[in-house]
Image (cartoon, helix red, strand yellow):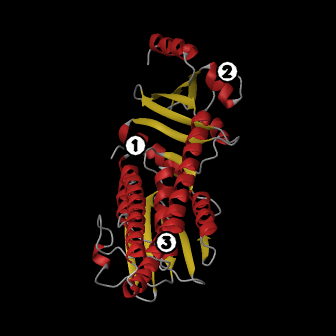
Amino acid sequence: MTEFSLDIIARIGELSPDGYIVYDYKSNIVEYSNAVFSRMADQEARSGYSLLLLRHLVAEDDEFINACIRQFIRENVLSNIELRLCDNRYVAVDAYIFSDHQLMLIVRDVTKLKEFLNYVSDFGARKDAILDMVSHNLSGPLHMTNNLLNALDQTTEKQQYDTIAQHSQLIRQNTQHCIEIINSFLKEEHLASARIFVESVRFDVVQKINVVIERISAFDKEKQIVLESAQDSLFVTLDDVKFFQVVHNVLSNAVKFTPAGGVVRVVVDSSDDTFTVSVEDNGVGIPEHLQPHIFERNTAASRPGLKGERSIGMGLYIVKELVILMGGSVALSSKENVGTSVVMTLPKARFGAVRH
């Protein structure tokens, strides 16, 4: 890079709201950093220092940093890589090669954006909890009303109460209409959710799963949900809203087909580049002839839950679609009257935004 081009970058850097750094990786010195970056790093604006001195500011694990470096070596560019700082701020970093020994980093403080995304994620969690409440607390009683009306019909038919029979028919029609509205609403929510923009952000897998468990347990206290993880926290770069929905759908399904007093285990395992979330129950299991169809859209394998909860036949189809969208895979194993296990394998980092 010539002195003139470095001067131009310095002029841009002094006007920009983002942090700018020009780094010579052969000599391992920073040739330029603007005042914005100096404020981010809480140090005096100067040149000539090693970029490694800033490593203590970053809270991310070496595994993630090395993955970013490997991607940069392959592509000569990094875009919108999110890093946590030790003071709980978040920054997004873009990196570009300028010559055979110089690169430029642009660092943006995205703490407020991160707080907003967390709010959106929380909002999505509350929405899913409300949908779960609607399906479990409203669908069940409506189906029970239908059963009671069947019994009422048998009684009135024998005694020929024509007026009561007409009224019971109207009640049945209205009840069925309510059930269809609920099912249609749930189906549209799931379908729309699979199509929306998918963004990669940094979040803690263990913390997200704990939130799901807390929400589901609040609606079904008769079953025990246990989280098993060798790590207290596991930070990954994926779509946190989509991850929440996937775990919520699988865990809700497991609870729905586990009898009172049963146990559902959520197991988190981690390898170098991937992690797995396994949801295992000791419920009624899935008949062998239905298992090949379990991930199909509008599947014929759909069954009512143990409390009469009606299924819309979309839950595991949506799970598969979202897991694939996030670059992962999902597998199911089940034995009737023994239980079911759903294992989701996902990458620890999927850079950039994706649109389905």
Mark 1 closeness class: few <14, some 14–19, many ≥20 residues within 10 Å = few
Closer to the observer: label 1 or label 2? 1
Determine whether 13 is above or below 280 in the image: above
Which numbered disc flags the more N-terminal residue, 3 or 2?
2
Residue 216: x and y in percent read 58, 66
Q: Residue at x 57, y 41 (%)?
A: 83
Which numbered disc flags the more N-terminal residue, 3 or 1?
3
Q: Residue at x 64, y 19 (%)?
A: 35
Which structural element holds mark 3? Answer: helix
Residue 326 makes an appearance in the image: yes
Which numbered disc flags the more N-terminal residue, 1 or 2?
2
Which structural element holds mark 1? Answer: loop
Kind of residue sitting beneath label 3: Gly
Q: Residue at x 43, y 64 (%)?
A: 345
Residue 164: x and y in percent read 43, 74
Quarter holding the N terminus? Answer: top left
Mark 3 closeness class: few <14, some 14–19, many ≥20 residues within 10 Å = some
Q: Which residue is mark 1?
A: 197
Q: CA distance from mark 1 to mark 2?
A: 39 Å
Which structural element holds mark 2? Answer: loop
Q: Residue at x 68, y 43 (%)?
A: 86
Q: Which residue is mark 3?
A: 140
Kind of residue sitting beneath label 1: Phe
Marker disc for residue 308 = none
Q: CA distance from mark 3 to mark 2?
A: 65 Å
Q: Which residue is mark 2?
A: 45
Q: In the image shown, does 259 or 83 lie closer to the viewer?
A: 259
